[in-house]
Amino acid sequence: MWETISDKLKDTEKIVFVTGAGISQESGIPTFRGKDGLWRKYDPMKLATIDAFYEDPKLVWEWYEERRQNILNVSPNPGHIAIAELEKYRQVSVLTQNIDGLHQRAGSKNVYELHGSIITIKCTVCDFKNKITSGFLQLPPLCKCGNILRPDVVWFGEALPQDVWKSAMIQASACDIMIVVGTSLEVSPANLLPVYAKQNGAMIIEVNVEKTHMSSSMDLSLRTSAAKALPGLVDIISQVK
Ligand code: APR
């Protein structure tokens, strides 16, 4: 699978991954747009927007708390673990759209959470922000200041954290290989990252069980799952010096 790029891997210093919900699918977390995806069952505009939150914070919190508990009870899969292991052989950065923290739990050090984190909770008014892994007795949970807490995630209609986005663009523009794993590339601005990488001469590889609208512009498009494909990349890169 990766043999065709073994020469390229030999003189590669920096690999950047852009990951989406597909890399966590084999950990048991549903994707958004796949056949069993979350957006097949729920209307994102009723759950993942700032207006939805202020209209019905309890409903939005019930959905996020259910996802939080699921995420806290699953583990990184061989796809996450392979990416973390690659740090032994090359400079690796992970630009993830996922909010599940599984890359960090697998051991990846340079993770940029473009859409925030479901584990981090912040106040809607004061500057309280903290990682909270326990469940909440009441929903919506309240801050000590008396205002409603929210998950530290980026909702539709909200801007990405600017410092994270700026760093992600720099990473994408300065890599030898970009590997796009488990994302439909439907959501901007994350779907611009492969464009920046290509503009700067990187080789772009896609790992996805289905074709995406950018598959034809990839240098290599592997139609397989993350957990099946990525350990093989570690095997080959550990042999090429
Ligand atoms: N291995 C690799 N790819 C997979 C796997 C797998 N095991 N399972 C599914 N996929 C692919 C699907 O074919 C699909 O192309 O992963 C992709 C998942 O796409 P989406 O569900 O659209 O998820 P994502 O691209 O991460 O969505 C981006 O949209 O709803 C917002 O904020 C949310 O971060 C999310 C953003």
Image: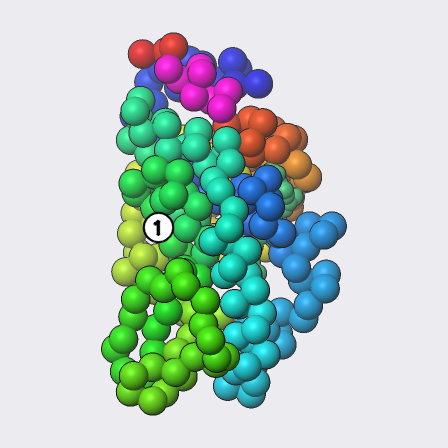
Q: Mark 1, residues whose alpha carbon is within 10 Å: few (<14), some, or many (≥20)? A: many
Per the rendered image, the range of residues in magenta is: 231-238
Report the residue at 43% width, 79% height from top: 141
The residue sitting at 67% across, 62% down in the picture is 39
Coordinates of residue 60 in the picture (x, y in percent): 56, 76
Give the percent coordinates (x, y) of residue 237. 40, 17
Quadrant of image for the N terminus: top right
Q: Residue furthest front?
A: 137
Residue, x 47% and y 40% (percent of image)? 76
- The kind of secondary structure the magenta stretch mainly shows is helix
**Render colour scheme:** rainbow
Q: Is residue 235 magenta?
A: yes
Using the image as rendered, state which of residue 173 and residue 241 is in the foreground: 241
Answer yes or no: is residue 20 visible.
no
Q: Is residue 122 left or right of residue 102?
A: left
In the image, taking residue 210 as reference, residue 60 lies left or right, namely: left
Vertical placement of 106 versus 88: above or below? below
Q: Is residue 110 magenta?
A: no
> Is 27 situated above or below 227?
below
Q: Residue at x 34, y 81 (%)?
A: 143
Q: Nearer the viewer, residue 216 or 124?
A: 124
Tag 1 residue:
112
Amino acid marked by disc 1: Tyr
Label 1: element kind = strand
Nearer to the camera, 1 or 217 = 1
User: Horizontal placement of 179 versus 168: left or right?
Assistant: right
Q: Quadrant of residue 162?
A: bottom left
Say if residue 13 shows up in the picture: yes
Percent x, y of residue 16:
38, 37
Q: Quadrant of the C terminus?
A: top left
